[in-house]
Structures are given as C-alpha cells and as structure tokens.
Amino acid sequence: MGPGAGFDGSKRDAIGTHALALDGKSGVERRVRSRRPRLPRFLPESRIMNLGVAGATADLLLVRDGNDVGVDVLRRVGDLAVVVADGIGSTPRTSGDDRMPKSGPPRRRKILRAFEAGPRRRAILAVLMSWNRNQSSRVGVFILLAWLAGTLGIHLAERGANPAFDTLGESLWSAWVLLFSGVEIQPTTTLGRLFAMVLVVSGIGFVGLFTGTVASILVEAHLRRRDVERIALEGHLVICHWAPRGMQLIRELHGKLTTTRRPVIIIDEHPESIVLPDAQEDPVFDQVYIVKGDPINEVILRRAKVAKAFSVVILADDREERHADGKSVVTCLAVRNVCRGEGQPSVVVECRNPDFRPYLTKAGADEIISPDELGLRLMARTALFHGMTRVYQELLTVGRDANEMYLIAAPEILIGRDFVELNGLFARHRDGKQSCLLIGIQRGDQMHLNPIGGEAGPLEPGDGLILLSRVILDPSRALPTNPPMDRPATTDG
C-alpha cells in the first residue's frame, strides 16, 4: 500500500475485514484483489482512499447490502485493476466500468448464472410464465368439475358391482383418491375403468399445472429482483422509494397511448413489500425491475444506472412520516452527485410540505409536485365553478379519446411566426384524431399560456409548443396543421 493510502475517518478498523491483496511486481498487471469483502455489522460503509500499487492509485467504496458487501471504484489513476472474488477457487470479477457487483455465496451465484443463460432459460420461462398466479382459480374450478363429473360417471358404472361406489358419498371419496393418489381402488367394469383412467390422467395434469403456477410466481419474483447491471438499460425511468400510489404511477407511465414504453426500475429498501401484478395478465407491468437498497446510497443508484435514465421520480417515503421531505432532499442530492455532466436525467420530486420547495430546488430537483397543494387548488376551483373536476380529470387521464396536454419542440419551419398565425395553422386542421389546439408556448423557464397580443412574440429557436390533443403526436408524420409542416421532435406528455 502506498504511503498516501488511508481510510475515511474512524473507519480505519475495517481494514481487517477486507482481505485485500496487492500485486505490483515488475512485469505483472497492477491490480487489487478482494476475496469475499466483509464489513462489521455496525459499519454500513467504508472508504479506502488513495490505495496505491506501483504508482497507480484508486479510491474504493465498500457498502453493506444485507449480508453482502458491494465494491465501487470512486476514482482511479493509472493502470490499476480491481478484482472481486466470491471465495477460494471462484472466478474473480474485474472492474470494467467502475461498477462492481456485490459478492455473494459462490454456489448461489453459479446457479443464477446457469438459470439466466441461453435459449434454455427463455424456453423454461415461456412455459412457466404462461400459468400465472391469476390462473390458479381456473385450475381449482377444473379440478372441481373433473371430480364431480368423474364421481357421477363412475358411480353410475360401478354401483351394485363395487361397494366402493355404491353410494354418492362413497363415490365422492373414491373418486378423490383416484384423482390424486392413483388407482388404489380398482373398478370392476369396463366403463368404470375408463372413468378411472380419465381421473388419474386429470390428477397428474392438475398437479403439473399447480406446480407451474407456483413456479411462475417464484420465477417472476426472481426476474423483478435480478441484478439490473446485467441488463442493457438506457433512457429508462427510475422510481425512488415505493408506496401503493406507485402502482397507478406505473399504469400512467405505461399507458396504452404511450408511444415509448420505457423500462422502470424501482429502488426501495424493502422489496418484499412491493407486490406487482403479473406481467402476463397485465402487460403494463412488463419491464419493471426492483433494486434493493436505499436510494440515498450512491452505489445503489449506480446499480440502477441512474446516470443513463430518462427521468428519476422521487416519491415521498411514507415510512419517514414528517421527515419524508428531508429524505427526498438527501435523495435528490445523491442523484445529482451521481449524474454529472451533460445528458442528466430530469428529477421529479413529490413534496409533502411546500416549505421544502426551496431546499429541493437547491438540491437539483427539476419538477416539484405537491399533491396536497394541487388538491386544495382543485377543490377551490370546483367550489367556485361547478363541474371543473371533470375538466381536470379529462386533462390528467391517459386513455383513449381523452384530451391531454403535450409539449413538443418547435420545428425549424415555424420559427419566426407569432402565436396568432401558429394557432390558425393548427385550428384549421380538423381531420382525424391527430388534430390538436395550440394553447401556449414554453420559452426557457417561462410559460406563455393563451398569450395576449404580442406577449409571446415570434417563435424562437429552442421554444416548445404546448398542444391539447387526444393522442400523442406520431413523430413519423407531419404536424397536424393546414398546410402540413415538417415532422416534429416529440416528448411524452
């Protein structure tokens, strides 16, 4: 270890748990090896600063995640590789993009790797997922019908010749035994044996269907919680903290009229509390993944690939009660610390207390939404103007034939025209569901809704058009104006 290496603060005592080996010999690749990194139970994380090997240095961050420890490379100077091995004899993993997967028991990780590989995995999943948890009731109905039909048929065929089927009560019990235990009670007639064969085959089939239903639940749970670092994600959506209202949020994000259905990653400390509908029964919840951990932890954020996300939604953590907004501020700071440079995701934050708005703005929030404040304003408008609730419900509902507001980038051909001329271009096109109305112009941080006179001025480069439309505009088609204009660059509303 180089003379400048050291540990962050009082975390110096954690060195005995890391089992680090440094290799800086001449002619050998410079690297840091870590076998099964551990941290004391009282220590959630540890930083190793200025770790030097033969002139190369690196800063490492070790973070506890349950019984495992994740290793992240914060900074690296020179040709220095960081290798993490699960245990003695296991295959080491070398840091490629400075994100190291957490370590775990070697046998468990080998099983997961075998399960996730190749066409065999896809074939197994296709069969298992076809029988989801919502079809278990159908299996129960089929079993009941097969039992009653078999009982009646074998009773009519065997009564008088076999005491096990003389009465309906005896026949019910004997048919149940045949259905799930095999031919322990021998029918004597040819017709009775045919019914017995049907019952035995049905019993075997129903057991297989039930096993497939249970397996599909377990497989889906594994898929939702699998390591998203192995999935190529970019332009996805990230939800920090989970609450029951997150279900409706995903339904809106993956609505039927959404042209770009982006994958969703949920970050929460308690993934076992997240119960999502089956993706086969409700396709809205397809491509929804779960990352276990606290979103204020930068390592967890990197696992969710926050830096490559399209948007980050920070829900108020209900478990924090009156401190929920404070945790949202810390989460927002962590997201902005991970996402630096150009192409940062938009950060949308749910705020309970409007007094926290200035702090969230300073923390880097792009959009701050206070549900209570919006609800009170809606109630006030409804009290003064009856029926306004239905108007806002129409504007906020993603559904077929429902009007919504959308923001699109202004095409170059429209630059220089004023609002009156632009409004006429859109108003004259009334053919088809693509027809829309221009209601405002966005210029930087200013929003010009229903501008009067020359308030908005001519359209400038970088402006956005605020449109009221029943459908999301198709980017492959020209603007719905009369005459038609060039294709716009669109964003989801």
Image (cartoon, rainbow, N blue to C red):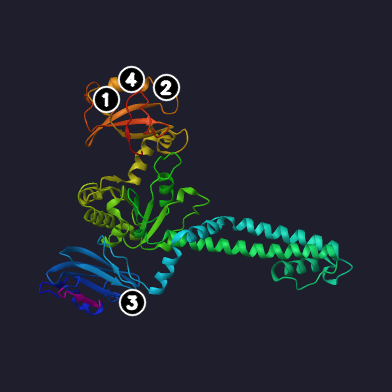
- Compared to 229, does 2 lie above or below? below
Task: Tell me the SS state at disc 3.
Answer: loop
Q: Earlier in the sequence, mark 1 or mark 4?
A: 1
Q: Which residue is mark 1?
A: 414
**Could you tell me how far apart the alpha carbons at marks 2 and 1 are, in whole angstroms?**
19 Å
Q: Secondary structure at mark 1?
A: helix
Q: What amino acid does circle 2 point to?
A: Arg
Q: Nearer the viewer, mark 3 or mark 1?
A: 3
Other residues around mark 4 within 10 Å, as few (<14) / some (14–19) / many (≥20): some
Residue shown at 38% from the left, 51% from the top: 264
What is the spatial separation of the Cα atoms under label 1 and label 4, in whole angstroms? 12 Å
Residue located beneath label 3 in the image: 87
Outermost residue toward the front in this view: 27
Q: Earlier in the sequence, mark 2 or mark 1?
A: 1
Q: Residue at x 24, y 62 (%)?
A: 98
Say what amino acid the circle numbered 3 marks.
Gly
| Residue type, numbered disc 4 | Gly
**What residue sits right under mark 4 in the picture?**
424
Task: Give me the C-alpha separation between circle 4 and circle 2.
Answer: 11 Å
Which of the 4 image quarters holds residue 379?
A: top left
Q: Label 1 sits on what residue type?
A: Leu
21 falls in the magenta region: yes
Can I make out residue 126 in this image?
yes
Quadrant including the C terminus? top left
Q: Residue under circle 2?
A: 430
The local secondary structure at tag 4 comes to: helix
Q: Earlier in the sequence, mark 4 or mark 2?
A: 4
Of labels 4 and 3, earlier in sequence is 3
Q: Which residues are magenta?
A: 18-26
Between disc 4 and disc 3, the foreground one is: 3
